[in-house]
Amino acid sequence: MDPQPLPLAGITVVAVEQAVSAPFATRQLADLGARVIKVERPDGGDFARGYDTAARGLASHFVWCNRGKESVAVDLKDPRGREIVHRLVADADVFVQNLAQGAAARLGLDAAALCARHPRLVAVDISGYGPEGPYAHKRAYDMLVQCEAGLVSVTGTPERPVKAGVPAADVAAAMYAFSGVLAALLRRASTGRGGPVEVSMLDALAEWMGHPLHHGMHGGEAPARTGLAHAVIAPYDAYDTADGSQVLLSVQNDREWRRLAEQVLGRPDLADDPRFATNRARTGRRGETDAVVAGALAGLTAGEAVARLEAAQIACARLNTVQDVAAHPQLAARDRWREVDSPAGPLRALLPPITLPGGAPVPMGAVPSLGEHTDALLRSLGMTEETAAALRRDGVVA
């Protein structure tokens, strides 16, 4: 049986994008088969290209968010550059932008203006705080939005709040933009019309604040910061093992506590001890509870601890480093790694999390160099070599 085509095969996306939120959204579209044309500045391109050089000389953020795209380097401040982008958009199905608030409108590239000109177009505006309100023009970097959305207030230890170690606000906005595009394309299939899609980083991350937000609004106060522990469950934390590793375990109910006490801690007397027998008692004596668990696990290696916990059917995990994740046996067993081409040579990359059995292979295209596809795209618009050379000479394209 022939494989089914990828869901977005035949869909063209034009993206005036930078940093993480829009690029990560459009990479999801590329992973599902869309053609993604990435519009970059001629003088350095997407500024995420310069964040670091960790990926064999390339920036790790850029490699993560931009595989499988075509790069065209165009100066949008020049009318000739804007005309190139507008001609690309005229033949596109989707347009995505995350420029600073108001910049896209000044260029005629905001979702409302584009959808008015092209009724079948799905156009996405990604912003920090939305197009109106007192924060509309406030700078909106990921860390700042994590703070404004309250994520930092519930992440960290009792002594110190910390931001998430991944760009949570950017990723949240990206995934809502991605799903918004899919929903709008589905609607277009039945109505023939596209339309604007609006996503803000604050809206997206505030939604992800779900349980702490509702706990605070309805319960009177937000859950306390507890590091790796849980505010209302004990034991639930990471514990040191004899080989210098850490193992995290979670006891969800009193039946599990009994199994932990009998089969892992070697303390069957604690199963019915009123100081520990209920979760309420254990959380009230969190320090004593953790000391009992820590004392037992300190004499075991991480492997031994995990084996005992799993035999007792207690939820557990190793506290892995990023290097451990890169060598994770589950990812290897499920063949989740591939290599993608890049200007620096082949780089490892994970398959996208959405798996469509029976479909065509995931493209996993190359990470583009700046302006790598400019000439080909100009030719596709019918420009002569002389016109393209003049644009390049004047710095309109690169």
Image (cartoon, rainbow, N blue to C red):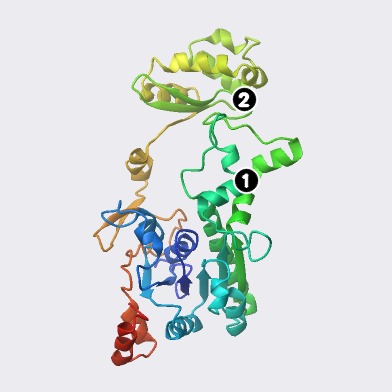
Mark carried by residue 209: 1
Q: Residue at x 38, y 17 (%)?
A: 300
Residue 345 vs residue 59, the one in the foreground: 59
**Which picture quadrant has residue 211?**
top right
- In front of the other: label 2 or label 1? 1
Label placed on residue 253: 2
The amino acid type found where label 1 is placed reads: Met
Classify residue 204 as left or right of residue 41.
right
The image shows a total of numbered marks equal to 2
Secondary structure state at the residue bearing disc 1: loop
Q: Position of residue 162 (x, y in %)?
A: 52, 39
Going by the numbered disc 2, the residue's amino acid type is: Asn
| Residue closest to the eye, 51 or 176 | 51
Q: Is residue 64 visible?
A: yes
Residue 396, given in percent of the width and then of the height, sits at 37, 81
Can residue 122 be seen? Answer: no
Q: Is residue 11 above or below residue 84?
A: above
In the image, residue 54 sits, relative to residue 382, either above or below, namely above
Residue at the spot x=64%, y=59% of the render? 135
Residue 133 in the figure: left or right of residue 85: right
* The quadrant where residue 236 appears: top right
Query: Where 185 sits versus 153, above or below?
Result: below
Q: Are marks 2 and 1 in contact (CB under 8 Å)?
A: no
Counting residues from the N terminus, which is met first, the one under dot 2 or under dot 1? Answer: 1
As drawn, the label of residue 98 is none
